Image (cartoon, rainbow, N blue to C red):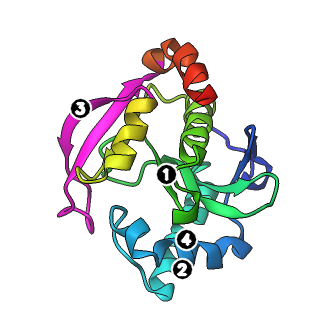
Amino acid sequence: MTFPWPAHTRIETARLLLRPPLREDFDSYVDLIGDEQVARFIGGVQARATAWRSFMTMAGAWHLEGFAMFCVLDKTSGRWLGRAGPWQPEGWPGTEVGWSLRRDAWGQGFAFEAAVAAIDWAFEHLGWDEVIHTIHPDNHGSIRLAERLGSAHRGPAQLPPPHEAMPVQVWGQSRAQWLAGAAARQVARAR
């Protein structure tokens, strides 16, 4: 499969722009991954040097695999809100679409809007047959979001090192289930 250079990949929703990471996003990413409340369910707080490596992992995945998490920006202000999108590292329990947003972006429907766009994109452009979300059992906000997206609880899973000790549950759905739930998502968007 041949992928376009990531710089050409853009998704626009009603309020958001999703695009691959740019170098100038790094300081915003450091703020995200340095917030203890945000980072507690995505591997924990990272020092700036460690954050650089994880940030570059996403950029590298875009270049070599043709996909990774998108940077999520407010379309009106250009403010960097977080990241959302497809992710499938070596040893991962499936084809994931995940999300993590800055705390000041929580509770505004941005994660739902970004996740819907990213799932649509993954099914259309990557040809995936299913999408999962690996969620810490105490991350009640992400569990509610997975349910709102139409994903069902599939049980526990184990992540590859260095996250093998983190408890996670898998939530997921097939492409057919996603397509069948399109009308329900339209209603959910209106809420």
Residue 140 in the image: state x and y as whole percent.
Answer: 31, 48
How much space separates mark 2 and mark 3, taking CA atoms?
33 Å
Look at mark 2 in the image and give the residue it sits on. Answer: 52
Q: Which residue is mark 3?
A: 154
**Mark 3 residue element:** strand
Does residue 69 appear in the picture of this structure? Answer: no
Instruction: Choose mark 2 or mark 3, whichever is in front.
Output: 3
Q: Residues within 10 Å of mark 3 (few under 14, many from 20)?
A: few
Q: Amino acid at mark 1?
A: Trp
Gap between marks 2 and 1, in whole Å? 18 Å
Disc nearest the viewer among 2 and 1: 1
Q: Specify the label residue 55 is tagged with.
A: 4
On the rendered image, what quadrant is the N terminus found in? top right
**Amino acid identity at mark 3:** Arg
The residue indicated by pointer 1 is 99
Q: What span is colored magenta in the figure?
A: 149-175
Q: Are marks 4 and 2 in contact (CB under 8 Å)?
A: yes
- The mark that comes first in sequence, 3 or 1, is 1
Q: Nearer the viewer, residue 98 or 143?
A: 143
Against 45, is 130 above or below? above
Q: Residue at x 55, y 51 (%)?
A: 84
17 over 43 or under it: above or below: above
Element carrying mark 2? helix
In-front residue for pair 125/117? 117
Verify whether residue 162 appears in magenta: yes
Helix, strand or loop for disc 1? strand
Which amino acid is tagged 4? Phe
